[in-house]
Image: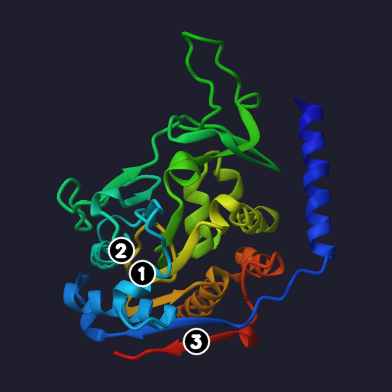
Amino acid sequence: MTKLRNVTLVLFCAITSVLAQAPQPTPPPSVVYSVHDPGSIKDYKTNPRVVHEMVNRLVLAATGQSDVTKAWASLVSPNDRIGIKICAAGGDLFTTHHDIVNAIVDGLVAAGHPRSSIIVWDRSLGGIKGAGYRPGIDGYQLQAIAPRDGYDAKAVLSAPLIGKLVWGDFDYVGDITKVPILSDTENTSNVSHFSKILSTEVTKIINVPVMSISETNGIAGCIYNMTIPNIDNWRRFAQGSRFGAESLAEIYANPLIAKKVVFNLMDGLIAQYAGGPQPQPNYALHHATLYASKDPVALDAIALKRLEEWRVRASLRAIGPIAAYIGFASQLGLGNSAPNRIEVRNIGR
């Protein structure tokens, strides 16, 4: 096992070195669209009509289409199996807002996709009822990733970071009726598995993260939302280390993610600039803004800039150093992180 891990380490470092040295194609300039409406949220309660209109304005602007049906149809084909990746780690108040998801689903249904075929998911859905979601009533599938069985044995990634396995990880060994329980040292792995929802159940993804800090990975934005919650043995990538953080960009570059995500819409109705993605109302504010882009890197870069501004006002340390994966993602050709390569277009109310 030690020899195997050493080989994996050498190969991983060699690949990373080649990627760093080889010239990557420069992506064209990116556009991040934003829409702000103070009437969209008050006292943590959203206005469904206003939020629905905000979502429609964003998808129209981002696709350049003349109506909402054509806009969503330009992003997904009739044969696609569509997933909407939300963030449900924020409990009642800070989960991706129900009204945003409903507006997206309504658009996809208008484009010809049966409501019952659309999967809305996160690793855990513990707080969604308090956030307004109605399993069995909303009409779309609300799915959590099942412990162990929800991960794909064939969809694996390796990295030279050893993680301690816990119950729920695919390779965790803890059943004393089958084999001897391994020690903490032995029950470790440098392998993670992608969720089956991501690997086999969806072909196109609408990525809907929240606008929040992640105390372990900088921000819980577009890249984070598609990586950390979609793999097992993930804690090794959430230790604040620069190397571990950069791994998020390499995980996102996997075709299971990079080739499936067609649209990113960030929920900034409430923005949380410390303590996230778990709820911390003392560090949150009503931002009443939604952002969208086809470029996840650019959207994360803009969100990080804004969150850092709030942190400065609150005399909190900069979070950027542990969000190094945003710049690294740009080096991998996943999008733009440089300010001079990103245009922010406010499409108004």
Q: Describe the element under mark 2 as helix, strand or loop.
A: helix
- Which of the 4 image quadrants contains residue 271? bottom left
Q: Amino acid at mark 2?
A: Leu
Characterize the local packing of mark 3: few (<14), some (14-19) or many (20 or more) Cα atoms within 10 angstroms. some
Residue with the mark numbered 2: 108
Which residue is farthest left?
A: 137
Provide residue 108's location: percent of width, then percent of height: 30, 63
Q: Residue at x 81, y 69 (%)?
A: 23
- Which of the 4 image quadrants contains residue 285? bottom left
Mark number displayed over residue 72: 1
Answer with mark 2 or mark 1, whichever residue precedes in sequence.
Answer: 1
Answer with mark 3 or mark 1, whichever residue precedes in sequence.
Answer: 1
Q: Residue at x 24, y 75 (%)?
A: 51
Q: Amino acid at mark 3?
A: Val
Q: Is residue 232 left or right of residue 81?
A: right
Q: Are marks 2 and 1 in contact (CB under 8 Å)?
A: yes
Q: Describe the element under mark 3 as helix, strand or loop.
A: strand
Q: Are marks 2 and 3 in contact (CB under 8 Å)?
A: no
Characterize the local packing of mark 1: few (<14), some (14-19) or many (20 or more) Cα atoms within 10 angstroms. many
Answer with mark 2 or mark 3, whichever residue precedes in sequence.
Answer: 2
Give above or below for 161 relative to 280: above
- For the residue pair 270 and 22, the one nearer the viewer reads as 22
Q: Spatial distance from mark 3 to mark 1, Cα to Cα?
A: 21 Å
- For the residue pair 69 and 317, the one nearer the viewer reads as 69
Q: Spatial distance from mark 2 to mark 3, Cα to Cα?
A: 25 Å
Q: Residue at x 47, y 49 (%)?
A: 229
Q: Describe the element under mark 1 as helix, strand or loop.
A: helix
Which of the two marks, 2 or 3, is nearer to us in this view?
2
Mark number displayed over residue 344: 3
Q: Amino acid at mark 1?
A: Trp
